[in-house]
Image: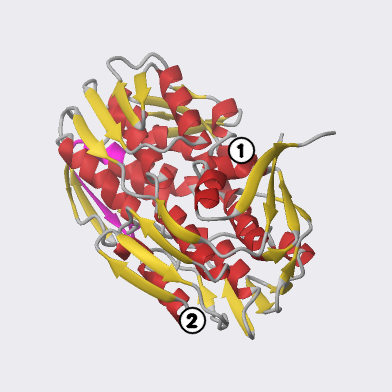
């Protein structure tokens, strides 16, 4: 098992290029199940989650070939209709094969994510939508079994905004008979990216990027070539890192609109953010100002950047509040930040952050993907040498983060844990 070792206190300077979006690549890969023709995706990040999705698709019968971020997919024949528990427990996004499998073959058997009770998980929104489209749903032995000769168009009103639910039903509706209208649909850039691929494959989709998406079902889809959008969460992480270390970093290959909410908050915190074409330059402030943040579905402040921004506020000159409205139990990084000297108090779904002059190095442990990034940023700004354990989480969403940070001047390395 690896750990990341950081000698903090060095401002980041230079240029860094953002990779392809993990949260976009996964549904795009699932969409290749919808056609027997070849689909080619480029700018695919080399991440643990992407590798898990590749293995799942291969298990279903999809032929794949990868080379330097370019992946060819050929789902000429679907050999299996089941996404097993061992795959889904590693990555909840595996549930994205449910809609395409059902639409293409009329049958799908997918493990419940993590084996959890369905009522507490957003997948119940996926299933309710598929039932409206004519699918017969059965829950048995920890699996969802869905059957339907051919899905039919329907009006779907999501009770709450769900990104994976919107993606799953968009893919299912692409091959359904008739018109499907999604109300209260997610508006994230990853939704638009998926719609763009599906349109290239011959799907009839309008309204993506708004809360109402309309899909006119077609009989079959063709192949396509598509480039995955840049990862806005990786971009945002480097932007916060520049501000937190009082550095000067140019983040390349981004869509400025995708990080607009974060850019505004960084400016409020005193950072200088210059946006031009496909890059952003962030110059950290001498004194970080406290800023309140409330996470919200896109175009609001991304929940996936909440932990990183909290690390920045931990060294602000004053008190701020971070309120999480998207996910419960997403403050698992708080105890570890406190080990570094952060003054944090959890009150319901809000953390009150009293900024301290500086953080101090300590051994800490990552609990999830974005918490890992938060702790790396905190280590970069801490005095002394910080060791972060269980960093396998970070490999799910950040490609070679330590190498990119080293190029910016950070003293960071990966090492084996000795027992």
Image check: 316 left or right of 398?
right
Q: Quadrant of residue 99?
A: top left
Image check: 327 left or right of 20?
right
Which residues, given as a range, are shown in magenta? 171-186
Q: How is the image coloured?
A: secondary structure
Considering the image in quadrants, where does the N terminus appear? Answer: top right
Q: Quadrant of residue 329?
A: bottom right
| Residue 185 painted magenta | yes
Query: Do labels 1 and 2 touch, CB within 8 Å?
Result: no
Residue at x 55%, y 55% (from the top left corner): 409
Residue at the limit of the structure toward the right, as seen here? 419
Q: To which residue does mark 2 refer?
A: 270
Instruction: Say which of 355 and 212 sits in front.
Output: 355
What label does residue 60 carry, if any?
none
Residue at the limit of the structure toward the bottom, as seen here? 318
- Residue 125 coordinates in the image, percent (x, y): 44, 49
Image check: 399 left or right of 8?
left
Work out whether residue 117 can be spotted: no
Residue at x 20%, y 46% (from the top left corner): 215
Instruction: Say which of 342 and 244 sits in front.
Output: 244
Residue at x 52%, y 75% (from the top left corner): 293
- Residue 62 coordinates in the image, percent (x, y): 36, 19
Q: To which residue does mark 1 refer?
A: 114
Instruction: Say which of 192 and 372 sits in front.
Output: 372
Residue at x 39%, y 46% (from the top left corner): 21
- Residue 392 coordinates in the image, percent (x, y): 63, 39
Considering the image in quadrants, where does the C terminus appear? Answer: top right
| Residue 293 painted magenta | no
């Amino acid at each position: 098992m690896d750990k990341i070792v950081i000698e903090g206190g060095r401002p980041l300077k230079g240029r860094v290029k953002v990779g392809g979006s993990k949260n976009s690549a996964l549904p795009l890969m699932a969409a290749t199940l919808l056609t027997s023709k070849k689909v080619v995706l480029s700018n695919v990040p080399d991440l643990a989650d992407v590798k898990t999705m590749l293995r799942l698709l291969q298990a279903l019968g999809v032929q794949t070939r990868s080379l330097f971020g370019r992946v060819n997919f050929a789902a000429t024949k679907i050999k299996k209709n089941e996404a097993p528990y061992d795959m889904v427990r590693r990555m909840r996004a595996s549930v994205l094969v449910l809609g395409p499998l059902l639409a293409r073959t009329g049958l799908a058997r997918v493990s419940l994510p993590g084996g959890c009770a369905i009522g507490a998980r957003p997948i119940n929104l996926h299933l309710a939508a598929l039932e409206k489209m004519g699918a017969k749903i059965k829950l048995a032995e920890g699996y969802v079994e869905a059957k339907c000769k051919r899905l039919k168009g329907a009006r779907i009103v999501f009770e709450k905004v769900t990104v994976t639910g919107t993606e799953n039903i968009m893919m299912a509706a692409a091959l359904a008979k008739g018109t499907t209208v999604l109300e209260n649909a997610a508006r994230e850039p990853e939704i638009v990216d998926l719609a763009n691929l599906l349109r290239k494959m011959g799907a009839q989709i309008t309204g993506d990027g708004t809360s109402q998406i309309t899909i006119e079902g077609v009989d079959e889809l063709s192949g396509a070539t598509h480039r995955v959008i840049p990862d806005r969460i990786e971009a945002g992480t480097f932007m916060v890192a520049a501000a937190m270390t009082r550095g000067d970093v140019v983040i390349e290959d981004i869509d400025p609109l995708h990080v607009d909410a974060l850019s505004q908050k960084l400016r409020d915190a005193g950072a200088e953010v210059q946006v031009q074409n496909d890059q952003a330059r962030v110059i950290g402030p001498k004194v970080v100002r406290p800023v309140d943040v409330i996470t919200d579905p896109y175009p609001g402040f991304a929940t996936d950047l909440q932990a990183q921004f909290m690390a920045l506020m931990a060294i602000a000159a004053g008190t701020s509040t971070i309120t999480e409205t998207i996910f419960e139990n997403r403050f698992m990084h708080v105890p570890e930040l406190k080990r570094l000297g952060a003054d944090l108090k959890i009150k319901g779904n809000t953390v009150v952050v009293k900024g301290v002059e500086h953080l101090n190095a300590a051994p800490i442990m990552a609990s999830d993907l974005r918490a890992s990034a938060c702790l790396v940023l905190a280590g970069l700004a801490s005095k002394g040498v910080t060791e972060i354990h269980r960093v396998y989480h970070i490999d799910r969403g950040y490609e070679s983060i330590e190498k990119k940070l080293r190029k910016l001047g950070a003293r960071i390395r990966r090492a084996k844990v000795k027992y």
